Image (spheres, rainbow, N blue to C red):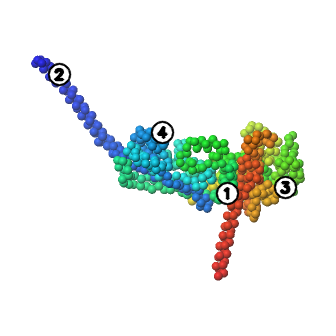
Amino acid sequence: MDLKDFYEDKRFVQSRIPFIQVAAVLVFLFLLIGLWNLQLLKSKYYIELAEKNRIRSIPLVAPRGKILDRNGQILVDNQPSFTLIVLRENWPLLENSLDLLAKGLSLDKKFLESQFEKYRHLPSYLPIPIKEDITIKDLSFIKAHRLELPALEEISLPRRFYREGKLAAHLLGYVGEISEKQLGTPEFDYCKPGDIVGKAGIERVYNQILTGIDGQKKVVVDSRGKDVALLESIEPVAGNDLRLTIDLDIQRAAEKAFQERAGAAIALDPRSGEVLALASRPAFDPNSFASRISKKEWDDLINDPRNPMQNRAIQSRFPPGSVFKIFMTIAGLQEGILTSEYTDYCSGSTVMYGRSFHCWKKEGHGRVNLHQAIINSCNVFFYHLGQKLGIDKIAYYAQNMGLGQKTGIDLAGEDTGLVPSSAWKKKVLKAEWYAGETISVAIGQSYVSLTPIQTARAFGGLALGGVFKTPHVVSGNELKRWGKTVNVSFESKFGLNEETIDIVGRGLWGVVNEWGTGRRAAIPGFDVCGKSGTAQVIGKDLKVSVDSKAEFEDNAWFVAFAPLHLVEIAAAVFVEHGGHGGETAAPIVHDMFQVYYDAKTKRKEGHQIAMDQVILTRSN
């Protein structure tokens, strides 16, 4: 290389030095700014992040309050259970390990993805539940993969336990995780995402009383996620126990008597409105909802043609059949059309408005008075009474005794039933009422339909002389005990003549204790009064195949109260496709009343023994 080339290379290098110096300064400034950002501007953020890796906040879930019957027997309790949750501070790391997590815990990956997406926009302090009732196998997997899955934590989550299984399922209801739709309602304004809340029945109506206050603990963990120290612990506060008016023994008797049949049974104390039993069959097992119910289980329930999720006691309306004749009798007596001496003739049928209407007894009952008409449930007698009363007077008396309207029971979803009138038909069906339509209404058919709870309340109020108490499964005193205001109107009155009550009461007593259709409800010494009802599902003149005959069997009713002059208990039983009310529904009333009567007798005997001991002590 000559001298000239050397100086040219030297000048080239020297010309590049300023650029290198500038580049070095820029790199230094970049590093300095980064250090400034880390050490000063974002120091708090990284300190908090480090703390999160060192300190964990673990929720302590409060158990729900127990549900008890009137005598203190536990209906709903809690049992120990462990749930696997994801702590949100480390969950981004976990999202990359979903395949491992799904396989190790036998979970559906799509379910995990949906859970993560559901909680993505919720507050970061809320953990993500991913599996309930974890097993020893699950725990072993978690321990073995603690480094790979640092966000996992197992917590104690008391699981709802319904001790009697399907018994009183519709009354008690069930629980589940609060939905996004529920979170936006005033009913659940005190709840947060992820809370377990009542979804139906008592669990929902009284959710606020039953719900406790969750606690929290903060622990220091090591690099493996193992607890090494407890920093702080706020203990959870359990929910309040709730005592119902239900008598578990009467409830058991009702449901056992149904066997596999569908229907509903109500027993209540008409003097207070306290519901002693409320059964709906078929039923579901609320324990299935205590942990996450599978899609198959849910589909099986909602697609079951027998509708096990339907509370037939308050949500289903049915034609009452001959039960309605008692309300017809009251209307006839109050209007002065009927008296105790009034008679009518039944030949087995009658022609009215150009059409033949038949009695259930083909050969007829002959000449019958009012007492005999009630006991024998003579259709022709009541056809003629319906013609004399007219639809609007029938509606007036029925509605004033609480039929065709909600009772106000403290359970959600109550149906109104229907008592037709000329105004109703004009408003709803845009048509005039025809006099011939009244004839079928007079025997509890046609448009008229009632719920079992309405019918039980009406019979109880009738026995009290026209005082109709609002049915309830939690007493006002129990609500006041937990600081709840009772805003329910607990009774309505409809004045009935003493003679009316006496005539109707003796007729209902005769149905059970003379030669009537309710003999299977009789209890010696308890003076049971009742009325059976058989309501057609399909016209008798229609032919039905042998295979589907059961589906079109008549529905059976029996409504009762006891004792005759000092009523203590009233009941209504409906058996779907049960045939004759006196044969299938009356025995269920008998079983409920027998349990009540036996308990009452034992209490009296116990009281008498105690009094005898006191007298003996004083005499000595």
Residue that appears at 52% across and 52% down: 159
Which residue lies under the disc numbered 4? 109
Q: Distance between the residues labelled 4 and 2?
A: 63 Å
Q: Distance between the residues labelled 3 and 4?
A: 71 Å
Crowd band around label 2 with a 10 angstrom C-alpha radius: few (<14), some (14–19), many (20+): few
Instruction: Residue type at mark 3: give it.
Output: Gln
Which residue lies under the disc numbered 1? 253
Indicate the position of residue 507 as horizontal and vertical percent values: 80, 57
Query: Which badge, 4 or 1, is on the more N-terminal residue?
Result: 4
Q: Distance between the residues labelled 2 and 1?
A: 107 Å
Helix, strand or loop under label 2: helix
Residue that appears at 66% across and 78% down: 616
Q: Looking at the image, do the residues carrying marks 2 and 1 touch, with CB atoms under 8 Å apart?
A: no
Helix, strand or loop under label 1: helix
Query: Which badge, 4 or 2, is on the more N-terminal residue?
Result: 2
Helix, strand or loop under label 3: helix
Instruction: Residue type at mark 4: give it.
Output: Lys
Helix, strand or loop under label 4: helix
Residue that appears at 86% across and 47% down: 362
Q: Distance between the residues labelled 4 and 1?
A: 46 Å
Crowd band around label 4 with a 10 angstrom C-alpha radius: few (<14), some (14–19), many (20+): some
- Please tell me whether mark 3 or mark 1 is closer to you in this view: 1
Query: Which badge, 3 or 1, is on the more N-terminal residue?
Result: 1
> Of residues 602 and 472, which is closer to you in this image?
602
Quarter of the picture containing the C terminus is bottom right
Which residue lies under the disc numbered 2? 12
Q: Is residue 79 visible?
A: yes
Instruction: Residue type at mark 2: give it.
Output: Phe
Which residue lies under the disc numbered 3? 372
